[in-house]
């Protein structure tokens, strides 16, 4: 039996730090389209559904070949709305109208440089490991042992013993890079979260895959990456 996966792209119309980012052209195409196109032709991905509260984003998504069957309810379009709740809303609709799926793949539009081969590798990990959650990760920019907190203007190690160890003596640290979240529907419904102790790490070997566009500076970094033509 072949695996069936629903890809969900979550794209609100509002953005305080970078207004209109999901429709802003990056490399000649709207930011959201990067996440729609990366899964086209992947056999396991049966549909890509865009969850948005913005009619213009919905129209662009449809033109790019994605489903955008409704506008997201206002209660799921606030700054405090969780990705899990948004995805559950999309999943419930899809399974009611199109049938059950084996996995839900969250593709955040702010991670445009995820590669097709990375997506396929993550899906393969999911299939080969009894459909345990698979989350995209990249190397942490700063090791937690070298981070600080402030007490007034005084620096204090964020972790006990921090700043006293050489980087080469520390266990490598990783962070979720926002590019890949794959989970079985029953797990998402039970946990209402993508991370759990049994989650597997999909390590990005290409640094640009961990670019997460949330500010104007991030956008400039993304444009610089495109300008240097380091992408396949």
Image (spheres, grey):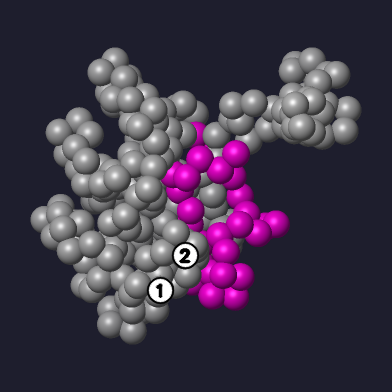
Q: Secondary structure at mark 2?
A: loop
Q: Residue furthest bottom?
A: 96
| Residues under numbered marks 2 and 1 in contact, where contact means CB atoms less than 8 Å apart | yes
Q: Is residue 187 visible?
A: no
For residue 181: magenta? yes
Q: Is residue 190 visible?
A: yes
The residue positioned 28% from the left and 78% from the top of the image is 98
Q: Which of the 4 image quadrants contains residue 223?
A: top left
Q: Residue furthest left?
A: 63
Span highlighted in magenta in the image: 175-204
Mark 2: few, some, or many residues within 10 Å (few <14, many ≥20)?
few
Q: Which residue is mark 1?
A: 75
For residue 160: magenta? no
Image position, residue 227 (x, y; %): 25, 18
Residue 81 circle label: 2
The image shows residue 2, relative to residue 179, as above or below, that is below
Tell me: 39 left or right of 79: left
Image position, residue 231 (x, y; %): 31, 25
Which quadrant, please, contains the C terminus? top left
Mark 1: few, some, or many residues within 10 Å (few <14, many ≥20)?
few
Q: Secondary structure at mark 1?
A: helix
Which is nearer the eye, 199 or 117?
199
The residue positioned 63% from the left and 35% from the top of the image is 174
Which quadrant, please, contains the N terminus? bottom left
Image position, residue 22 (x, y; %): 27, 47
Which is nearer the eye, 158 or 199?
158
Residue 114 circle label: none
The residue positioned 68% from the left and 32% from the top of the image is 173
Tell me: 49 left or right of 183: left
Q: CA distance from mark 2 to mark 1?
A: 7 Å
Which is nearer the eye, 214 or 116?
214
């Amino acid at each position: 039996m072949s695996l069936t996966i629903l890809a969900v792209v979550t794209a609100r119309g509002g953005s305080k730090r970078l207004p209109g980012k999901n429709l802003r052209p990056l490399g000649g195409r709207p930011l959201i389209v990067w996440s729609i196109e990366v899964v086209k032709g992947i056999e396991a991905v049966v549909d890509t559904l865009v969850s948005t509260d913005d009619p213009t984003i919905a129209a662009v998504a449809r033109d790019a070949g994605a489903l955008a069957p409704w506008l997201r309810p206002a209660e799921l379009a606030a700054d405090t709305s969780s990705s899990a709740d948004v995805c559950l809303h999309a999943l419930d609709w899809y399974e009611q109208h199109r049938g059950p799926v084996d996995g839900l793949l969250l593709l955040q539009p702010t991670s445009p440089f995820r590669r097709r081969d990375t997506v396929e590798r993550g899906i393969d990990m999911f299939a080969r490991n009894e459909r345990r959650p698979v989350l995209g990760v990249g190397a942490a920019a700063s090791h937690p042992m070298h981070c600080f907190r402030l007490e007034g203007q005084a620096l204090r190690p964020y972790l006990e013993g921090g700043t006293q160890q050489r980087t080469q003596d520390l266990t490598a640290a990783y962070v979720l890079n926002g590019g890949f979240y794959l989970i079985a529907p029953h797990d998402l419904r039970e946990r209402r979260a993508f991370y759990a102790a049994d989650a597997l790490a999909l390590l990005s070997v290409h640094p640009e895959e961990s670019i997460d566009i949330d500010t104007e500076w991030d956008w400039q970094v993304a444009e610089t990456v495109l300008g240097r033509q380091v992408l396949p």
